[in-house]
Amino acid sequence: MVSMGYPAISGPKSLNDRIAIVGAGIGGVHMASLLKERGFKNIKIFEQRQEVGGKAYSRFYRGVWNEFGALFLSDIYDQVAKLVERYTPRLKIVSKAPSSVSVNDNEFTTWGNLLIQNTGETSPQAASRRIQDAVARYDRIHRCLFGNYSFELMPRPTPKVLQQIQGTVQDFLHRHDLMLLAPIFRTFLTANGYGYINETAAIYGLVWLPPVAVKGVFTPENGFWVLLGAFQSIVTEIARQNKLHIHLGANVNGIQRLPGPGGIHITYSTKGHPNIYTEHFDFLILSPAMNSLLDIVNFNVKERSIFSRLTNANYILTLVESDIGRRGNDPQVYYNDAIEQPTYPVYAGINFYHAKNNISGDDHRLGIRENGPDGRPQETVMYYQYGYENPWAKDIDVIIQSKLASTLKRLDKRNPRVLEQIKWGYYFPRFPPREADRGYLWDVLDMQGQFNTWYIGSSVCFESMESVIEYNNLIMRIMKI
């Protein structure tokens, strides 16, 4: 792939090198499996949590796997689909039940209707033609800017192209007369916790939403699919079948990188035990958000100047069981008026049992077919909140719980019971527009291996399972060994 414009990068020097990977999410586990396939044997993964999977965390309850991280698949998820086929062939990928948008607590519409309204046309046919014209124009512009490429991250654009994609997603859409597509970008980005289109750098929208994904919105499946099973099981099966060496519950306190063999010194402890250990490795692979490691890794000036510019949000997911209350025809609903409110609004809810079993219409709205095989009338719904303030701070946590309770009360969700709440910090780590415009994503790619270190995971690509897998594949394709 070097001939396509990607840099040739260095990696471990020999198959006998001792390799340390920090993080047993999909990035770390998948990378370890790729290295083992190439003959590397001395690989150890350090994972802070007590289980494999990272943000691909799933919980089984009342007949369905509820997803606390990876949610769905879109039409670009070909690499995830390959892993499902290889490691968990018993799991099926099927079309997802529809989603709707809450106009108010008693009125719901579709994203398609919002697209039509966005055109200002009174005729649905005229609106549809204008939207299709915009999709075709986006396709032409995308190909003109980046050409054809194999991986999610395209080769480094020319300075002229970087200038044409500078600014935010909204800036790009406005500059190229594509604002009719803004609701689609808003759905894929903001409604899924990937920032607001008027502040997220354009490159993230262009990477995450290529023309094929936009076109998928207009298919019967609306471009989204669900996994009948658990996303976490994909990661755990990769680890199990490849017999990966994973140290769970590892608190990595410091990472020092010195020249020469064995120059990677990792100091760590194990949760529940007082002892502190240091192990020596020849090569280091980092998968957590790089800005979360600034006080742990002895980054050099070049690395620190890039990674310190990363910003991120926090994502709160709460699984709640309650009486049904008011709801529309679809098991996934976006509270459109709340999406851009500050400080952790509840902006979406998903009934996974109905979404994964394609239950919609009156069967969903009236509770004719309710959660699980147990016959109980209560619903189980995952609620989503997104914000920038520290969610573990007491005053912010009060706001988070208050807004959740207020939403449940407003929707008449009586007798609510929180089954589990997860707070993902360092969610969607990304470069602000100014740094993204300078080509920082490709600067990181150029640095790969220079300091006996690879940087992988969402902070150097995009916060999705598909993106992390794609990036790992890219590194392996252009590695010099």
Image (tube, rainbow, N blue to C red):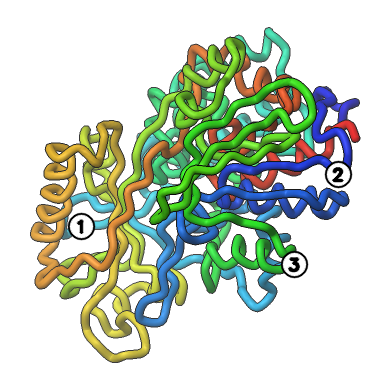
Which residue bears the numbered disc 2? Answer: 16
Q: Is residue 384 left or right of residue 200?
A: left
Task: Determine the CA span between mark 3 and mark 1.
Answer: 43 Å
Indicate the amino acid at tag 2: Asn
> Residue 476 placed where, x, y %?
80, 40
Indicate the amino acid at tag 3: Arg
| Viewer-nearest residue: 37 or 45 | 45
User: Could one spot residue 109 in this view of the protein?
Assistant: no
Looking at the image, residue 343 lies above or below residue 350: above
SS state under label 2: loop
Looking at the image, residue 164 lies above or below residue 354: above
Near mark 1 (Cα within 10 A), the count class, few <14, some 14-19 or many ≥20, is few
Task: Determine the CA span between mark 2 and mark 3.
Answer: 27 Å
* Residue depth check, mark 3 versus mark 1: number of the one nearer the observer: 3
User: Could one spot residue 346 in this view of the protein?
Assistant: yes
The mark that comes first in sequence, 3 or 1, is 3
> Residue 357 placed where, x, y %?
45, 76
The mark that comes first in sequence, 1 or 2, is 2
Task: Determine the CA span between mark 1 and mark 2.
Answer: 62 Å
Indicate the amino acid at tag 1: Glu
Residue at left 48%, top 18%? 308
Residue at left 65%, top 53%? 29
Q: Which of the labelled discs sits on residue 107, or is there none?
A: 1
SS state under label 1: strand
> Residue 431 placed where, x, y %?
50, 22
* Residue depth check, mark 1 versus mark 2: number of the one nearer the observer: 2
Residue at left 64%, top 43%? 21
The part of the image, by quadrant, that contains residue 391 is top left
Q: Is residue 204 left or right of residue 314?
A: right
Which residue bears the numbered disc 3? Answer: 86
> Decide: marks 1, 2 in contact (CB < 8 A)?
no
Q: Is residue 149 left or right of residue 172?
A: right
